[in-house]
Image (cartoon, grey):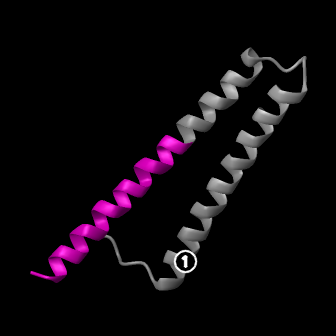
């Protein structure tokens, strides 16, 4: 069994998660801006970056779902 995190640790985790999404948003905006404004920056240049962003967001979504499952287990065990 893993030790429960303190409220401070949970806040730090959530702030880190928010920062992660902000970083992904910044990268996505960068790719989109370059595609729209730079004739030398092609779709072929953008695709690897977009695929990486999508993959990272998918990993984060998996982490969120794991957290939800864990919290559901705690909540429903509490109410038994």
Give yes or no for residue 29 being in the magenta stretch: no
Q: Residue at x 90, y 17 (%)?
A: 40
* Magenta extent: 57-80
Local crowd at mark 1 within 10 Å, few (<14), some, or many (≥20)? few
Quarter of the image with the C terminus is bottom left
Give yes or no for residue 61 being in the magenta stretch: yes
Q: Residue at x 35, y 56 (%)?
A: 66
Magenta span: helix, strand or loop, mainly? helix
Q: Residue at x 54, y 44 (%)?
A: 57
Q: Where, by quadrant of the figure, is residue 37 drawn?
A: top right
Q: Is residue 1 above or below residue 19?
A: below
Query: 10 left or right of 41?
Result: left
Where residue 19 appears, as percent x and y from the top left, is: 66, 61
Residue at the far front: name it: 36
Quarter of the image with the N terminus is bottom left
Residue 1 in sight here: no
Q: Where, by quadrant of the figure, is residue 79 drawn?
A: bottom left
Q: Where, by quadrant of the figure, is residue 48 drawn?
A: top right
Where residue 41 appears, as percent x and y from the top left, is: 85, 21
Q: Which residue is mark 1?
A: 11
Disc 1 secondary structure class:
helix
């Amino acid at each position: 069994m893993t030790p429960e995190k303190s409220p401070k640790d949970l806040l730090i985790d959530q702030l880190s998660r928010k920062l992660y999404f902000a970083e992904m948003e910044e990268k996505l905006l960068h790719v989109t801006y370059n595609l729209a404004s730079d004739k030398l920056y092609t779709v072929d240049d953008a695709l690897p970056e977009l695929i990486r962003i999508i993959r990272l967001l998918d990993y984060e979504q998996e982490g969120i779902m794991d957290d939800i499952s864990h919290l559901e287990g705690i909540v429903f065990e509490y109410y038994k």
